[in-house]
Image (cartoon, helix red, strand yellow):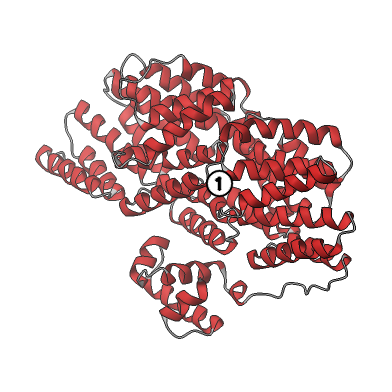
Amino acid sequence: MPDEEVAAELERSAARAQARGGFAAAAAFLERSSVLTLDPSRRAGRALAAAQATQQAGALDEALTLAASADAGPLDEFQQAQVDVLRARISFAADRGSEAPRLLLTAAKRLEPLDTRLARELYLDALTAALFAGRLGGAGDARHIATAASAAPPSAPPPRAADLLLDGLAVLISDGHAAGTPILRNALRAFHSDEIGTEEGLRWLWLAGRAAGFIWDYEAWDSLTMRQIRAARDVGALAHLPLALSTRVGVHIFAGELEAAASLVQEADTLAEATDGRIVPPYGALALAAFRGREDEVTRLVRTSTQDFIARGEGMGLTVSQWVTAALYNGLARYEDAFAAAAQAAAEPHELWFSTFAAVELIEAASRSGRSEPAAQALELLSESTHASGTPWALGVEARSRALLHRGEAAEALYHEAIDRLQPTRLRVDLARAHLLYGEWLRRQRRRLDARKELRVAHELFSDFGMEAFAERARVELQATGERAHKRTVHTLDQLTPQEAQVSRLAAQGHTNREIAAQLFISPSTVEYHLRKAFRKLDVKTRTQLAHRMS
């Protein structure tokens, strides 16, 4: 039975819950408030608010149902536009396919005369969706969206961090890295500001972190994704957590922290089970399996994912699959296979992040298989972004890649440059690969003693990371110099299941069982069960010992 007094009190309770970060509770209050509202216009407005809060909580199907209830109206023009926005964002969250850019672009244009600020946010959403659609985006590809975004009304001064991010990405796509990188740097500085509100941070920090990867800024990639994950966990914004987790997986992989990466993949899977299961991209699992050197697992994941990517129109997924396949085969020293995969991944350079990483794999595979022209072309593409960036990571990877195309003293100088630039950074995987390539080059110059030093470092690093294929490649090369290297033995940490490793890592960081349970959506007794098993496998008796063992 309708009751406006109760409905209004529920609406106030929802506002209090949302202020504390309780999106799920706010959604429940608002939904009930809508049901109890007699006035049709007010009822539709509360249903719309309930749909928005439900989408924030990650319950996409329920949000669509509430949106349909709101759409029954009556709604004013701005509210109707908000329904379109909600449906477009749900389309992207659910499928990340080729339909989302068109829907988001349409919503952005509709909002321009009503709310410039919100319209620019929708253009950023549309551009993000176009990057995911990639080569399968059709008329809604990234260049088309970038052109439309550049023509949109400018933001009111001073520009928000999200405005700078939109401008930077649009310019980078339309005009290249030299023009876009400085604007993106300004955006990243803005996102590091304490003035970023919770809502803006939740919405865009993951994309800002990914943009940092576009311009080879590892430190910003690390800090921004961590900041969003903490914020999303604090307020229970499950809709924003999966992409942040997926984006952060690469932070740990490139640092050689594959166990930490596996923990994030496991958390994302757990989150999928706790929500509707459609909002977790599989990129982290693909990259993790490839860098671990597990061909069977990569083959299975690629086979099961590819059909889904094509059906949805998620071109970025195809690029990820091909990039990690190329990395896998370079680790296995199967350069023909690596070249074939890398050439496919690098075919569309506007799929910014992964196509650039694919170019790195292509240069190595092409140079190792006697394809100097494709290697040179890929190096030219790579250097556009690395020169514009100028970070130690960018210049170190470029020097390593360029060394593969040179001979004699020029090649050696470039290998030294790569190692010197990467040594002070956390980019341990790229450093290990520089040592490996330099060691292989030295061996082919018949400088066995010098080669042993580089190959030994590479083998030890890859073994510590758990990168089995690259470790074996280094071992074989080291053995060819006359030095015997032992194959990597299974580390005790590898005996933990993904859930045990995840729980153990959080416990080692000082979290209580209750905090771990809340974060992983499991019960405290389940946390205790996994910890008991981990303690037994790691032969530790206290959390202090566990922290030392996990470090």
Q: Eyeballing the image, is 171 above or below 502?
A: above
Q: In the picture, which quadrant includes the N terminus?
A: top left
Q: Foreground residue, 69 or 506?
A: 506
Where residue 142 appears, as percent x and y from the top left, is: 57, 25
Nearer to us in this view, 447 or 475? 447
Tally of numbered tags: 1
Q: Which residue is mark 1?
A: 281
Which residue is painted at 52% across and 84% down in the image? 536
Q: At label 1, which amino acid type do we have? A: Pro
Q: Residue at x 24, y 30 (%)?
A: 45
Image coordinates of residue 248 in percent, x first then y, are 51, 50
Q: Residue furthest front?
A: 409
In percent of width and height, residue 445 lies at 88, 54
Q: Secondary structure at mark 1?
A: loop
> Residue 512 vs residue 132: left or right?
left
Q: Residues within 10 Å of mark 1 (few under 14, many from 20)?
A: many
Residue drawn at x 35%, y 20% is 155
Query: Do we see residue 10 in this rendering?
Result: yes
